Every structure is written in structure tokens, then in C-alpha cells.
Image (cartoon, rainbow, N blue to C red):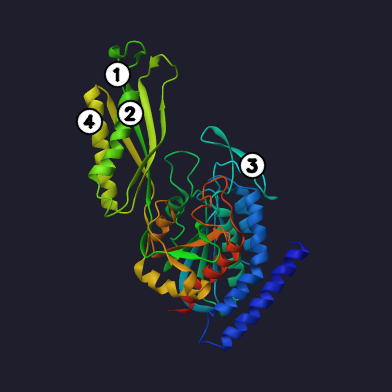
Amino acid sequence: MPWSDRASISLLALALSVASASSAQAQAAPADPARIAEAAHAVNGQVVGWRRDIHQHPELGQQEVRTAKLIADQLRKLGLQPRTGIAHTGVVAVLKGGKPGPKIAIRADMDALPVTEPAGLPFASKVTADYRGQPVGVMHACGHDAHVAILLGVATALVAQKDQLPGEVMFVFQPAEEGPPVAGAPFGAKLMLDEGVFKDFKPEAVFGLHVWAGLQVGEVGYRSGPMLASADEWSLTVRGKQTHGSRPWDGVDPITVGAQILLASQSLIARQINIAATPVVLTAGQFNAGVRFNIIPDEAKLVGTLRTFDADVREDVIARLRRTAQDYAHAAGATAELQVVNNAPATVNDPALTRRVLPSLQRAAGEDKVRESGLVTVAEDFSQFANTVPGFYFFVGSTAQGTDPAKAPINHSPNFMLDEGALEVGTKTMLQVALDYLHGP
């Protein structure tokens, strides 16, 4: 380990051991916000460094080899014993405190997006890769670089006071939240669960956060119950009969049928679904057919996403879309086959856990900075963990002070710009949440 790393870790451990000793003498306030803010500030230089390193070297889902090594190496420096290779590139480590107490898990996602980053930042990504057969740029356009750095910061702070720490904490670094390299394969959270990440260590609660352009730095967003939508990837294959473009009556045009189905799908949402009760979004992102200007092809394919917050509504919309597609196809002498893959269930914050955690957010960020969020139609496979044990997920504002979040480029934009002040806020709030829970209600 370089001397600078040893010195940094030693200084942090010394600072936090003083805070922990103070905590041991003042049992009435085991998770005092001032001490937690001090701990978050002490580690923030490292958190910023990790974030910039990861941002400059982004990796797509299930390809996070360098990122996983960075994480595992840092966890070993802290004296932990990380398990690697879970769900291909996932990393997990458990910290056992010096006192009995509950078990919790804290999760961060690691992967980047197939997005080309504009030049400008001194640590901007220049990485390129292959994504499902296409050459792409790679960028942390969603903020997962920040999530990894924040969780490493939380781990560093907790390890430094482990002798006074009640309970156990599992740090979960998850691959492929944005999806695997092969369409239809399981996303990272489900694959980690399938491979037994909670088999020998089942936490009482799991926590996660997301840096969010819709809030300014210093602000924190939460919601009890449904918060983020379920995400389904659907594909519709319309099969007709190929013919010359000048004689459409000799064939069956799947492009026309596909267009009719697409327009009807929007009427389906507007006229058949009670969107006043729960939001529903049905979007087509691809429409592919044919290879030549004067040939009507045999087949057209539409691919898109469905976002819902209620499982029954989801099933109803899928059934209606399938029936609509088949009826339009039948009327034209074509066929239509709909396939739907659920990439992530809705993210639902456990109401009882939310009531318990909300005061922690308010202590860490300030009561006037904690915002109740509306329903958000983006999705997150953190929901897989939160469907296994009670979960709580919250937003950490990432838009710079003085910038209107409504006008800031949102996550997934190539122009998404994280203000690094969000890193310390994220570390501080997650530390407060974790320590408050571990020390008891």
C-alpha cells in the first residue's frame, strides 16, 4: 500500500476512534449528527478520488472488472474479506461490529451506460466498448461512480469505529443495474440473489441511495410505499408476407400493421387505463423492418418499455397490449407475438422502515432539506433486494446550488453533471441511516 494511502487511512481511523470513544462515553447519542458529519468529512477526500477514478474508467454491466478490483482492494485495505465474482463481477463484504446487534445491508451499483461523454472534465471518460453488437462510448451518465465511492466511504468510516459498532453490515457492490450485455438475461440484483448473496447473511433491512439531478446538492428525497416504477422490456414481432413495394396487395405489410398497433397502444393507455389512480407509461424505443426501399418485408419488430407501479395494473396492460396487437394483425392477415421481460419490479419503500429512517435523513441533511418525492417512472433493480427483505431507497441531490433542477440535464443524459458536493451529503446521510438503525430505534 502506498504511504499516502496508509497515512490517510490511519488519520481517518484516529479521528473516528476519538469520535467513537466520545460516543461510548455518551450513550444517549450514539449516532450524533455532528460526529457523523465529521466522519463523512474526514473520508470525503478519498470518496472524491475514488469517484473520479471510476468515472474516468467506466465499464458496462457484467464487465466491471477494473471497478470490482478497485473495490475489493480497498475493502482488503480496511481489513475486510470481500467475496468477488458474484453475478460475474459483484463484490460483497461483511463488517462485524464489536457489539451484538442487527444485520443490515447497504447496496451500491457499479455499471456505466453506453453513452459518449462530451469533453470537458479533466477526468472525462474516453472509453469505448461494444454494446449488443454496436460500438459505443461508455460513461457514468447515471451516477453509479458516485454510489460506489459513497459506499466505500461509508465502509471506511464504519470500519474505523467497528469496536463500538453494534451488529453487522453487508456492503453490496452490484453489477449490471442498467442491464446485462445480452438482452433478456437477468439484471445484476436478481442474479446476485439467485447466486445466494443473502443465503448465509439475511439482513433485517437493506438500504440504497441514488444521486439525482432532480434535486439540488444538500437536498434529500424519499417516499413511503411505491417510489420507482416497475420496468418491463417488451418486444412485438409482426409477421406478414413479403412482396414488391409496387404491389402491396400481393403481400401483407407488417410495417403498416406495426404502425397501427403502435398508435393503438397509446390510445389503450389514454382510454382504457385509469391513469388517475396510478401512472402508466408505454413507450416504443425501436421500430425495425426491411432492408430495401421497394420491398415490403416479411417482418417488423417493435421494442419498448412499460412502466407501472401496481402489479395488477401491469398484468392488465400487458394483456390489453397483446390482445390489441393480435386483433390488428388478424384483421390484416398478419400475426403478432408479444414477449415481455420484467427487468425490475417497482421499488417500494417499506412503510414501517420509512417511518423509522425518516428522522435519520432529517438529522443528517436538515429537516428543511428533506423532500417527499412524487412517483418517479424510472426504475431500479434495488427493488429485487427490497422484495426479499424490507428496503429503503432515497435520492441525494446532485445539481449544483444556483441551478434549477428542472432545467439540469437528467441522469442518463450525456450532459449529466454531478456536483461533487453530493458525495459528502450521500456519505453523511447513509452513515446516519446505518448507525441509527444499528443502535436501535
Gap in angstroms between the C-alphas marked 1 and 2: 11 Å
Is any atom of residue 399 visible in this view?
yes
Residue 51, given in percent of the width and then of the height, sits at: 63, 57
Residue 295, given in percent of the width and then of the height, sits at: 39, 15
Circle 2 is placed at which residue position?
258
Query: Which residue type carries mark 1?
Result: Val
Compare residues 94 and 386 and report the one nearer the observer. 386
For label 2, the SS is: helix
Q: Which mark is residue 327?
A: 4
For label 3, the SS is: loop
* Residues tagged 1 and 2 counted as in contact (Cβ below 8 A): no
Mark whose residue sits in front, 2 or 3? 2
Circle 1 is placed at which residue position?
252
Bin the neighbour count of mark 3 within 10 Å (Cα to Cα): few under 14, some 14-19, many 20 and up: some
Q: Which mark is residue 15?
A: none
Query: Which residue type carries mark 4?
Result: Asp
